[in-house]
Image: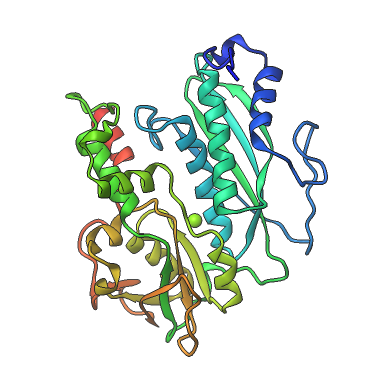
Amino acid sequence: MVDEQADRSVGELSEGEILRRILDRLGDSDALVGPGDDAAVLAAADRRVVATVDTLVHGPDFRLAWSTGFDLGYKAAAVNLADIAAMGATPTALLVALAMPDSTRMSFVTALADGLRAACDELAPGCAVEGGDLTVSDTLTVAVTALGALAGRAPVLRSGARAGDVVAVAGSLGRAGRGLRVLFERFTDAEGRPSPIDERLLTPEERDDLAAQLRPAPPVALGPVAADSGATAMMDVSDGLVLDASRLAEASGVTLSIESASLGADPASALTGGEDHALLATFPSEQALPQGFRRIGSVHRRGEHGVLVDGRPHAGRPGWDPYRDWDERTG
Ligand SMILES: [Mg+2]
């Protein structure tokens, strides 16, 4: 079926027409009241709702030269699903606010809706977009609110790690950071502006790293699994392992000792590369780790430093944020 509207800009269509096209892509809702009314109505089975919001802004958070509409929708959903999972909860619904320039192609918007839906279907089956808002802005912005259910569990906070616990992660560490490095080092023009990705210039490993950066796939289902297995603290790794581990250590009043030999072939990227949205958790040492988690260190009484790598404080920057660094350089 040819969609003769796909090449039109959103400025040429009414809000109702745009909405209808988005809703067509999102599939069936099992909310009590789904999209289309003034607000959605969702069931809250155990009288608690886990809620989070994260905004992706063109410039500091993504570049259209590198991200397709599908990529952007997928990532906007995935980063929020990871935050719900990191509380030990199961995502139940997303609310999406989209601000976009008048000139945005309708095909981009429908691809974004497809990306939102694909992330829900693949990472958090049962979760769907249940509402949202559309508006016009010079800067393309996607703000996603995610809601989740604890199903009777206690939420897993950052503050529960205790000396003697094991430090573990689920999901990849460092790949998204390597992907970002590839983008900034290889796909920018002479002025340092993002230029289109030429897949032919990439090795299979680099392609995987780029996919991890542009469409991260956090282990959302393992958040509730960790909670059920007695995780004492948990968070998702968004800004780099050392930086995020230091936040968990601070909240818990402990020191996390990380063993770089447990971090795979590229420990440097694993320690500081952000945006994989792996789950970082601590577990009591006397029990087996749940499937999907691997041990990377241990928890100790609070010392001078919140995080030690191979027994030493980590030298250099704990994380890397080239989008923001890049904006500072180029204005
Ligand atoms: Mg988080």
Percent x, y of residue 271: 29, 62
From what the image shows, is residue 80 above or below residue 189?
Answer: below
Which residue corresponds to the image point at 37% horizontal and 48% vertical from the top-left?
212
Q: Quadrant of residue 259?
A: bottom left
Q: Is residue 321 visible?
A: no
Which residue corresponds to the image point at 48% horizontal and 37% vertical from the top-left?
56
From what the image shows, is residue 308 above or below residue 238?
Answer: below
In front: 213, or 39? Answer: 213
Quarter of the C terminus within the rendering:
top left
Q: Quadrant of residue 65?
A: top left
Most extreme residue toward the front, as rendered? 1
Which residue corresponds to the image point at 31% horizontal and 48% vertical from the top-left?
209
Q: Is residue 99 visible?
A: yes
In front: 314, or 267? Answer: 267
In front: 118, or 269? Answer: 118
Percent x, y of residue 328: 28, 34
> Image check: 323 left or right of 112?
left
Most extreme residue toward the right, as rendered? 32
Percent x, y of residue 188: 23, 29
> Image check: 227 left or right of 108?
right
Percent x, y of residue 312: 22, 74
